[in-house]
Image: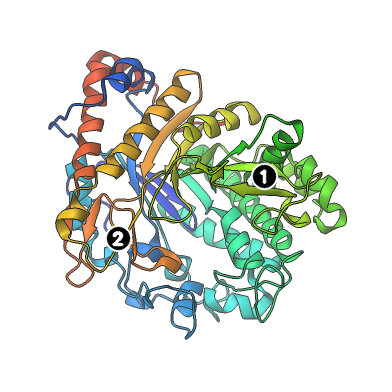
Amino acid sequence: MDISMKKLNISFFILLQILFFFLLNFISCELLVIRESLKKNNLSAVPSNFLFGTASSAYQYEGGFLADGKGLNNWDVYSHKPGNLIVDGSNADIAVDHYHRYLEDIDLMHSLGVNSYRFSISWARILPKGRFGEINEAELEDRYGSWLSPESQEDFAYFADICFKSFGDRVKYWVTFNEPDFQVKFGYRLGIFPPLRCSRPFGNCTYGDSEKEPFIAAHNIILAHIAAVHVYRTKYQESQRGSIGIVLHCMWYEPISNSVADKLAAERAQSFSINWFLEPIIYGRYPREMQNILGSILPEFTTTEKQKLNQGLDFIGVNHYTSFYVKDCMFSACEPGPGTSKTEGFWAQSSQKNGIPIGEPTEISWLNVYPQGMDKIVTYLKHKYHNIPMIITENGYGDVIKADSTIDELLHDEKRIDFMDRHLDALSTAIKKGANVKGYFAWSLLDNFEWNSGYTARFGLHHVDNKTLMRRPKMSATWYKNFIAEHRKWKGPDQQQLEDANDSPFYY
């Protein structure tokens, strides 16, 4: 990809699965009235060098199924298998054809006035035949079990090294993995994502062990992250002056009551999700709650690994969409469901309390609108991890395409505007209280392929016609454009010049 394109003055923010954040010098001058409470009370808390961007991912966007020698990834294989769980029978062979239309999409970003862009580089494009030139990534599952084998750590470090070497003169922010907490849950416990491994009662898969394999896979992902961080810090960071982190899917878990048991259950829910990865990476150990419940099921780190794990990131990427109530299942009986088993931590989640939703329900089954969760999860991470820099790497509102949906209805997305407005307000509140947040990335620039939901779920600021691939801005695109412009106007040139003078990659 030509990175000396028109209009771009770029530093990159790469995800090593890999996700890039391009810092684009773009200006938007069209203004819209922003909520007075946000403008007056909270815009001043957000620094002028804050990263405002949009997010994407390779498989969901690119298309170019086998273009330019690309190998197969596990979703290429899965989406072509009869009987998969993709609801509309689609795949991402074409997706939104970002691989061939990236210049057009950069123009869309330019029109928004964003200063950053997050996108991923497919492992199967960089190394279509693997580390030894004999196999492609999709076949790593057959060769040694992929993330169930320690060999995956070496393969990932090799991949990361190539990316650091090739792009590090421009990339200043790197992320190793996107949502590994969900990858292991869906791929190795529930068996609804590749590699489709599980056991009863969690699912009905041909292979797998839902009680053990998620912890083995997570262990190797954590060590693969550390291997990549070690390569970067020892070979590249000093000269390239970048930073490196990881992204987790961070839901807020609200205790369903004020009881001690439910409060402890909410903490266990975090321990068996985001802290499962962050505590080892930052503190060199698994959460105490996991150790106490799982015992020998939980893999152990060697002394050498613990030394490498200590402070193994420069920032935390936060993908936040929604929140749930949590109740205790350790001392109280619970109906079977997400979180209730021993290996999940003995907690139950619900979107309702006494029949009342935690927030406004949406057409996406798992998504309730609870903006307070943004403030709460960011504040929680601030206190839990000593205010390590954070970036909101995904946040967005989804709706579902129906047979009778009209283009006018799809473009007039007032609920998405309200969602973004209220979540940015909540984020600004957290920043005002001292949270060290460096950026916000809307999911997503375009409607795209949403995994097992196919093209039925739409999160984009721009509508994409599935037949013509024509992009059209929704009302939310104009709103986001004007929000960013209002932020620049609010900060003023003197404050922006002062903050830009201190604008550099951050380290922990």
Q: Residue at x 73, y 31 (%)?
A: 259
Q: Which quadrant of the figure has residue 190? A: bottom right
Mark 2–mark 1 distance (CA, rounded to whole Å):
41 Å
Disc 2 residue type? Met
**Figure check: 474 above or below 403:** above
Say if 75 sits above or below 444 in the image.
below
At 65% from the left and 79% from the top, the residue drawn is 143
Residue 445 picture location, percent across and down: 29, 51
Point out the frontmost of discs 2 and 1.
1
Q: Report the number of discs.
A: 2
Q: Position of residue 1 (x, y in %)?
A: 29, 60
Q: Give the answer, above or below, for where 486 lies relative to 318.
A: above
Q: Earlier in the sequence, mark 2 or mark 1?
A: 2
| Residue closest to the eye, 461 or 68 | 461
Crowding near the residue tagged with mark 1, few <14, some 14–19, many ≥20 C-alpha atoms within 10 Å:
many
Question: How are the residues colored?
Answer: rainbow
Q: In the depicted view, which residue is nearer to us: 206 or 126?
A: 206
Residue type at the position of mark 1: Ala
